[in-house]
Amino acid sequence: MANANPAPLATPTDLNRNDTRTVADALNASLADCYALYLKTKNFHWHVSGPHFRDYHLLLDDQATQILDVTDAIAERVRKTGNLTLRSIGDIARRQTIKDNDAEFVTAADMLAELREDNLKLVESFRTVKEAAEDAKDNATSGIVDEWTDQAEERAWFLFEASRKG
């Protein structure tokens, strides 16, 4: 029988434990939003229709893959600092700020606009991580979050450009 009270995680780090908890909280909030955005992007990928179907279908699949790829890096950063990360769909639902879209039909234009705004919201979340990491002197997190921010800004830009008329 497994020990009912296992020892706390003792990952070696020179960072202050209280500071790393603050960074981990910010990372977990971003992680929850990444999962929400990933699922919404896949949902729209599956359900997009219209004259630009192929282009949008491929764009959304590429973006979903990129979002999913960053989730592992976020969770591993939380663990490297000796903290716990998300453990369930319920945990994601409690933390996510990006809203789900359960509509049976969404126009392609509305899909692109909604995902653009959601990616910009994710950028805001990453900026919160950056601030917490810098306050904690966690330069590894501070540095890696820049790439995630750039990717989200690029996704928003592509969605904006794809939605332009003319």
Image (cartoon, grey):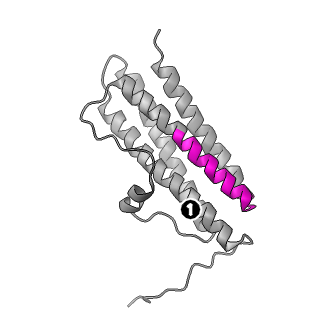
Residue 72 appears at what percent x and percent y? Answer: 53, 56
Q: Residue at 61% x, 67% y: name it.
A: 21
Relative to 113, 134 lies left or right: right
Magenta stretch: helix, strand or loop mostly: helix
Q: Is residue 141 visible?
A: no
| Front position in the image: 121 or 163 | 121
At x 63%, y 46%, the residue is: 127
**Residue 15 lies in magenta, yes or no?**
no
Q: x, y percentage for residue 29?
A: 51, 55
Residue 133, compared with residue 115, is above or below; it is below
Mark 1 Cα within 10 Å, few/some/many (few <14, many 20+)?
A: some
Image quadrant of residue 132?
bottom right
Instruction: Please provide the residue range marked out in magenta.
Output: 121-141
With respect to residue 118, does 76 lie above or below?
A: below
Find numbered disc 1 in the image and state the secondary structure of the residue it sits on. Answer: helix
Q: Which residue is mark 1?
A: 25
Side of 98 where 81 appears, left or right: right
Q: Residue at x 65, y 44 (%)?
A: 147
Q: Indicate the position of residue 13 as horizontal and vertical percent values.
A: 71, 72
Give the residue type at disc 1: Asp
In this view, the residue farthest toward the top is 166
Quadrant in which residue 49 is drawn: top left
Look at the image and say whether residue 135 sits in the magenta stretch.
Answer: yes
Residue 74 visible at all: yes
Q: Residue at x 44, y 89 (%)?
A: 3
Q: Is residue 59 above or below residue 89?
A: above
